[in-house]
Image (cartoon, helix red, strand yellow):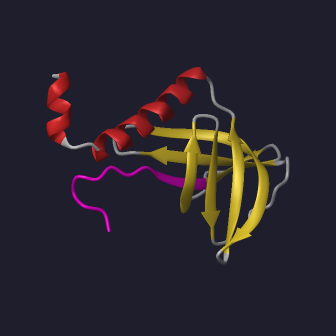
Amino acid sequence: MLHERQHQITVSIRLLRIGEMTIHGKSHPVIPLELVPNGLVFLCPWKIPIQSNITLGYVIDDRVDHLLLTGSLEDRGLFQGHYMYRLEFEADREQKSRIIGMLNRMMLHELQPSKLKLYS
């Protein structure tokens, strides 16, 4: 369980489009294992079809910033009873910078406040 001071990045997925048909699907939380500016590795309890006519949206939220990105699923495997997916984001420079900001905020929350006073 997270302590009050801890910072968490949450990731959820939702269906955006099948072929030419736009869909406003519900967001479903997934378990992020690795987040980098150009991609994500996550665990999901169900099998996601890896097809070019299906567009999924990936919602990344750290309660300071909120991003909705698309991307292509590159790989699928099994890990401890869950499906593990690796994807590459279709993100521009600004979106990648925002992901780096989320990761920096998460790391900053792990530091002791007394150490930060040296830089004030």
Q: Quadrant of the C terminus?
A: top left
Residue 109 coordinates in the image, percent (x, y): 29, 44
Residue 69: quadrant of the picture: top right
User: Viewer-proximal residue, 9 or 67?
Assistant: 9
106 with respect to 54 (left or right): left
x 34%, y 45%: residue? 63
User: Viewer-proximal residue, 18 or 70?
Assistant: 70
Inspect this view and state whether residue 27 appears.
no
x 43%, y 49%: residue? 9
Above or below, 69 against 86 in this view is above
Dominant secondary structure, magenta: loop
Residue 3 coordinates in the image, percent (x, y): 25, 61
x 73%, y 70%: residue? 78
Q: Residue furthest bottom?
A: 81
Above or below, 93 against 39 in this view is above
Residue 4 located within the stretch drawn in magenta: yes
Residue 6 located within the stretch drawn in magenta: yes
Residue 12: quadrant of the picture: bottom right
User: Viewer-proximal residue, 106 or 19?
Assistant: 106
Inspect this view and state whether residue 69 appears.
yes
Residue 72 coordinates in the image, percent (x, y): 75, 44
x 53%, y 47%: residue? 59
| Range of residues picked out in magenta | 1-13
Q: Quadrant of the N terminus?
A: bottom left
74 with respect to 119 (left or right): right
101 with respect to 88 (left or right): left
How many numbered discs sit on the rendered protein? 0
Residue 94 coordinates in the image, percent (x, y): 53, 22
